Image (cartoon, rainbow, N blue to C red):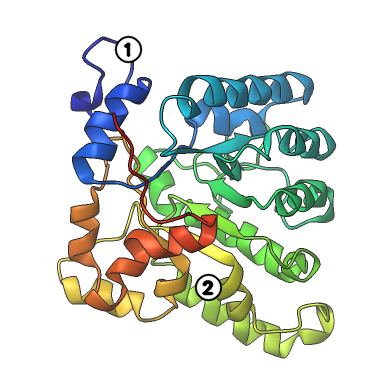
Amino acid sequence: WRKDANPPGGGQAGTDPHFMIEDLIDRFGIEYAVLFGESSHLALSNLTGSDWPTAVAKAYNEWLINDWFSVDPRFLGTVFIAPQDPLEAAKEIDRVGGHPQFVQVGFGTGSQAPYGQKQFHPILEAAERNNLAIAVHIATEGAGTSYPPTSAGYPSFYVEWKILHTATLKAHMASMIFEGVFEKFPKLKLILVEGGIGWVPETLWKMDQNWKAMQTETPWVKRKPSEYAAEHVRLTTQPIEESENPEHIKQMLGMFPADQMLLFSSDYPHWDFDSPEYVKKLLPDSIKDRVLSETARELYGLPKPLSVAT
């Protein structure tokens, strides 16, 4: 955590909505803040059984409504679920998904199967039914009941995990495309959270290349995988890869439709928090407005800025 993000009245960073308004929303002129729970909530997908994780998810969603949404309409939120029980997860999405401040369904990347597989379709169907995106957040691969975070097994150090965890995002994205999720649920959007973007161009290229050679294996994939990705998949800027040569980042952003797929994210209040001003410096002028506001506005169906007295 950033120590300067600790609320002056005490408590852990990110636990006081009033201080977050002051320290993040008003300080940086942010129109809306889409809240995403901490690793303890993401890890619900890694627990054995389903009754307790489902109960915790319900309690979290109620807490978000009562303690955060009621404070400021600029707070938007994530419906947390336990995806290992898809039917109960779908019920929870239907229970609270109609609240106007919920904009997505969230869970961790750690799983015993890629999320495009049919056992998870009740979750995807419920999200589409409630006009909510699916947000899959890096953090839980290799924990609890999920498989190791790399195909070679468990790394020794956090730095290894942080570098290598993009493979999990690739797996979930490829699964949802090649299982035909976006043909079955044509309004659904997938957000890959906190996994960087440098891996995206080569993954899109590989998917297109191999789909072209093996179309008979997945005939329900009717378009290039990269076309499904551009329409249905979104990525967050934090943590954006950095290079000693700023031109490298701009070149990378030109290798995939970043103006459609990339969303600004801050990762507040973590130690590697990125402010809008910092990200703005890294982006080409041609996509700054899109990435910093318009892609999210379109994804979540958000109106223009609210005027709120705080």
Q: Residue at x 45, y 59 (%)?
A: 297
Q: Position of residue 121 (x, y in %)?
A: 80, 52
- Residue beneath label 2, please? 203
Please determine whether, in this image, residue 106 is positioned above or below residue 309: below
- Residue beneath label 1, please? 11
Q: Considering depth in this image, is 14 or 298 the residue closer to the camera?
A: 298
Q: Which is more foreground, mark 1 or mark 2?
A: 1
**Secondary structure under the numbered disc 1 in the rendered image:** loop
Q: Residue at x 72, y 43 (%)?
A: 112
**In what quadrant of the picture does the C terminus appear?**
top left
Please determine whether, in this image, residue 267 is positioned above or below residue 214: above
Q: Quadrant of residue 232?
A: bottom right
Please determine whether, in this image, residue 52 is positioned above or below residue 221: above
Please determine whether, in this image, residue 177 is positioned above or below residue 306: below
Query: Tag 1: residue type?
Result: Gly
**In what quadrant of the picture does the N terminus appear?**
top left
Q: Residues within 10 Å of mark 2 (few under 14, many from 20)?
A: some
Left or right: 194 in relation to 49: left
Q: Residues within 10 Å of mark 1 (few under 14, many from 20)?
A: few
Q: Residue at x 15, y 66 (%)?
A: 244
Q: Position of residue 35 (x, y in %)?
A: 46, 37
Q: Position of residue 249 (x, y in %)?
A: 26, 71
Q: Position of residue 70 (x, y in %)?
A: 48, 25
Q: Residue furthest top?
A: 10
- Circle on res. 180: none
Q: Residue at x 28, y 24 (%)?
A: 19
